[in-house]
Image (spheres, rainbow, N blue to C red):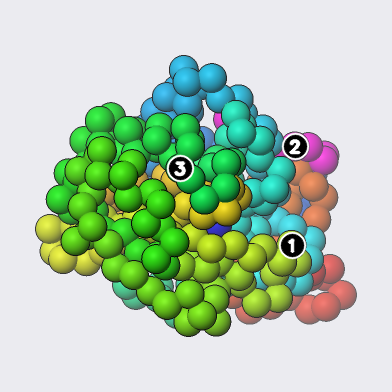
Amino acid sequence: MLRRTFIGLTTTAGLALASLGRVKHAKGEEDHDSDQDCYINLQAVQTRDELIKYFKENGYHSINPLPLVTGVEFNGGLQFDDDSLRIGARDYSIQASARVEDLSEKNKPGALPLFHVMALSPAGGIQPNQSIDLSLKFLINQLGIVHDRLRVTGTNHLSAHLPLLQQYGIQESQIRFVDLKEARIAGKGSGYFEPKGHPRSPSLETYSIEYVLPSGQEIEIVEIGLDGIGLGLGIERLTMARHNQLLTWKQGLKSFRDAVQASAQRQDLPLPRGYFEILGLPQPDSDTGDA
């Protein structure tokens, strides 16, 4: 669910695989423990590992993420987001995602071709619950994020969460309220998440938490559903915030390439259209099995 402008260039071997349009290997499950090399840097891996340790210590259990290569046409055959409906109140999933639409922002620092989200469930309806409380505690107490640098964006329904936000130093003056109708038309989160054409048809009111870097640029680090569905912490985004350093699209291309190739191998699927679009490679001929 987490949005938006959320890493090394393609090697000769990668280009050779791309020209074939298909990578074959035995089928297998997606597993975050098997793709250490598919993160933009070791700092992001450290953030991921700290998140996992923290939530496990608080009684949460891992469930398998969805495959990065989906086998469907939407989003160029790449996983757009997590599936919040499959995550229980004490579950978490580390979901790798990529969005072809982010190509339009590739020259903006902070935009990445591949990103990972720790997906949780804020089950409990409009009122905040333990998952949200623990997430805020992790941001402020463990990562050392300065609360004065946080901003919150959403509809006026997020006011029910204001007492909890205030416990972590976030004041009403740091909240930007958006119109629900306009947010739903956009459908990109920070008010309402409803991507057009999404095969799972997610539709939920949300609010986002942004971090303001010393340069003044904001990056979204958390997206929270207001109706008891969906909570995502962006691993690369949290890494940028804790180190006050933006990552770039070019830095992320190698990890994107490796992650997509690995996902295609595990499922015996062709490399999808979005792989070639994001890497700036020509699409293979149709008879090579492009999805």
Q: Which residue is mark 1?
A: 200
Question: Does residue 227 sit above or below 131 in this rendering?
Answer: below
- In the visual, does 183 lie left or right of 121? left
| Residue 178, image quadrant | bottom left
Look at the numbered disc 3 and give the secondary structure of its residue. Answer: loop
Asked if residue 212 lies in the magenta stretch, the reply is: no
- In the visual, does 66 lie left or right of 42? right
Q: Which residue is mark 2?
A: 29
The span from disc 3 to disc 2 (Cα, nearest Å) is 33 Å
Q: Amino acid at mark 3?
A: Pro
Q: Is residue 10 visible?
A: no
Number of the label disc, if any, that sits on residue 218: none
Question: Does residue 229 sit above or below 75 in this rendering?
Answer: above
By secondary structure, the bulk of the magenta-drawn segment is best described as loop
Question: Does residue 78 sit above or below 123 in this rendering?
Answer: below
Look at the numbered disc 2 and give the secondary structure of its residue. Answer: loop
Residue that sits furthest to the left in the current view: 214
Instruction: Name the residue located 65 percent from the left edge and 70 percent from the top edge.
Output: 75
Magenta residues? Answer: 26-34
Q: Rate crowding at label 1 as few (under 14), some (14 to 19) or many (20 or more) other CA atoms within 10 Å.
A: few
Pick whichever, 120 or 242, lies toward us. Answer: 120
Pick whichever, 161 or 121, lies toward us. Answer: 161
Camera-side mark, 3 or 1: 3
Percent coordinates x, y for residue 282 in the rendering: 63, 79
Q: Which residue is mark 3?
A: 128
Q: Rate crowding at label 3 as few (under 14), some (14 to 19) or many (20 or more) other CA atoms within 10 Å.
A: many
